[in-house]
Image (spheres, rainbow, N blue to C red):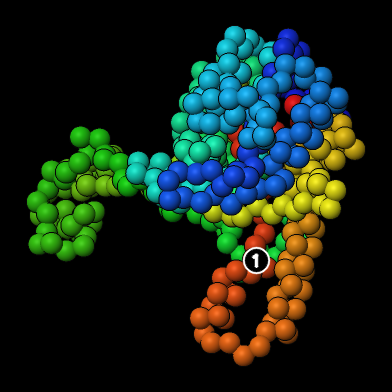
């Protein structure tokens, strides 16, 4: 079966624009009383991705924002500057234009007060200075009102970034990863087909069917749906009972409705030839909500993270489908994570072997300081509508 190109607008671009953000927090710049851990890989990542967009994808209109020493105030990634540059990225966008938004830095979670998040937490992007941009705010700045026919690809190389763009569909865009044992891991895979977990409540029946016209019993469970025997005992049975029994039933409730747009089975409900009625918006995140993203710095100052493998795969396979891209990217990150786990285990074993007699406080301090050895990353592909995973990926 021949592969299909991505939606037509991604093949007839009139302009390509990109906004790339890399924050290292190298001076620990955060809000008063808040310490932000430095991320040495952020700036190398954004530098490599900017070069890739220019050399391999033809992007010439690219804005790069970092907190490197010597960068002018205008292009330092503070919250105010980010808002201005995101608006500039969107300004004048026409059908056929392609946009790329890239972020490497800290992201976090805060309690959701509106009930709009399934896990009860909103994702936030942490700007320079520690100010946070909430996921729905980022969505409004970046996605809302993009014209039909335009395309946006957002890439987040940060922790807890699964739904950072607050799109509708994530679970249904997941790919099968046979090399991962999900047995005891925190995963939403086993919950995707459980509709009742997203129940809003019940719907009221039409007014004509809300209450029975017959006298109810004395609080029995069957009062809600009177049986034929009950109706006979309480009075004559009209012929309409046989024609439309529902008219004589008591108050009903409907099956639960989904509160959230995606439950993992959305593609089965899509029309076979569905056309987009909005902008084509895609997000790729290096981790699921609540997960830690692994990265590493090499001796020559380079970086290894999701960005590294994404660039490598796209260079090696310029004609790659969404399904193949996410499969290869997940496998590359899984292999890298396993190496990081092994390194952490060896470090912990050496520390344990060389540890002398210590009191409980020293042991507690050591346990808290050592790196994680069992965390994996579930890379996320987000979209407004379910992605046709057999289409070619285009930036």
Which residue is at a point 50% across and 30% down the rendered structure image? 79
Q: Secondary structure at mark 1?
A: loop
Front residue of 38/12: it is 38
Front in this rendered view, residue 385 or 315: 315
Residue at horizontal 65 percent and vertical 48 percent from the top: 39
Residue tagged 1 = 371
Quadrant assignment, res 52: top right
In this rendering, the answer to whether 358 lies above or below 314 is: below
Q: Nearer the viewer, residue 304 or 309?
A: 304
Q: Residue furthest bottom?
A: 357
Q: Is residue 26 left or right of residue 333?
A: left
Q: Residue at x 79, y 35 (%)?
A: 48
Find residue 188 and report its horizontal and vertical position in percent: 56, 55
- In this view, the residue farthest toward the right is 316
Q: Which quadrant would the N terminus be assigned to in this image?
A: top right
Q: What is the x, y in percent for residue 146?
A: 56, 18
Count of labels shown?
1
Decide if residue 301 is on the left or right side of residue 139.
Answer: right
Q: Residue 122, image x and y in percent?
A: 45, 44
Query: Would residue 68 be found to the left or right of residue 33 on screen?
Result: right
Mark 1 Cα shell of 10 Å, populated few (<14), some (14-19), many (≥20): some
Q: Residue at x 21, y 62 (%)?
A: 221
Residue 309 coordinates in the image, percent (x, y): 80, 44
Q: Quadrant of residue 245?
A: top left
Residue 261 in view in this figure: no
Quarter occupied by the C terminus: top right
């Amino acid at each position: 079966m021949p592969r299909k190109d991505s939606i037509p607008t991604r093949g007839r671009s009139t302009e390509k624009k990109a906004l790339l953000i890399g924050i290292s927090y190298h001076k620990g710049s955060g809000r008063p009383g808040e310490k932000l851990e430095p991320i040495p890989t952020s700036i190398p990542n954004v530098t490599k991705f900017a070069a890739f967009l220019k050399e391999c994808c033809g992007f010439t209109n690219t804005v790069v924002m970092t907190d490197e020493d010597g960068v002018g105030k205008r292009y330092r990634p503070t919250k105010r500057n980010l808002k201005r540059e995101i608006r500039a990225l969107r300004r004048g966008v026409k059908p056929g234009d392609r946009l790329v938004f890239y972020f490497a830095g800290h992201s976090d979670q805060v309690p959701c007060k509106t009930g709009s998040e399934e896990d009860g937490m909103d994702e936030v992007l942490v700007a320079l200075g520690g100010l946070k941009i909430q996921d729905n705010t980022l969505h409004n700045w970046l996605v809302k009102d993009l014209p039909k026919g335009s395309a946006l690809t957002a890439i987040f190389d940060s922790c807890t970034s699964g739904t950072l763009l607050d799109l509708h569909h994530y679970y249904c865009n997941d790919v099968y990863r046979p090399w991962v044992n999900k047995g005891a891991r925190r995963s939403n895979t086993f919950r995707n087909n459980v509709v009742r977990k997203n129940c809003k409540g019940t719907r009221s029946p039409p007014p004509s069917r809300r209450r029975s016209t017959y006298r109810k019993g004395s609080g029995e469970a069957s009062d809600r749906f009177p049986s034929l025997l009950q109706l006979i005992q309480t009075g004559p049975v009209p012929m309409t009972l046989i024609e439309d029994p529902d008219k004589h039933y008591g108050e009903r409730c409907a099956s639960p409705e989904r509160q959230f747009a995606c439950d993992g089975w959305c593609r089965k409900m899509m029309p076979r030839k569905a056309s987009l009625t909005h902008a084509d918006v895609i997000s790729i995140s290096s981790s699921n909500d609540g997960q830690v993203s692994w990265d590493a710095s090499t001796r020559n100052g380079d970086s290894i993270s999701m960005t590294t493998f994404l660039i490598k795969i796209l260079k090696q396979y310029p004609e790659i489908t969404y399904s193949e891209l996410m499969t290869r990217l997940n496998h590359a990150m899984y292999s890298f994570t396993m190496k990081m786990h092994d390194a952490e285990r060896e470090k912990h074993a050496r520390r344990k072997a060389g540890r002398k007699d210590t009191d409980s406080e020293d042991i507690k301090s050591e346990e808290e300081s050592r790196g994680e050895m069992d965390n994996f990353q579930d890379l996320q592909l987000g979209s407004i509508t379910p992605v046709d995973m057999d289409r070619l990926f285009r930036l």
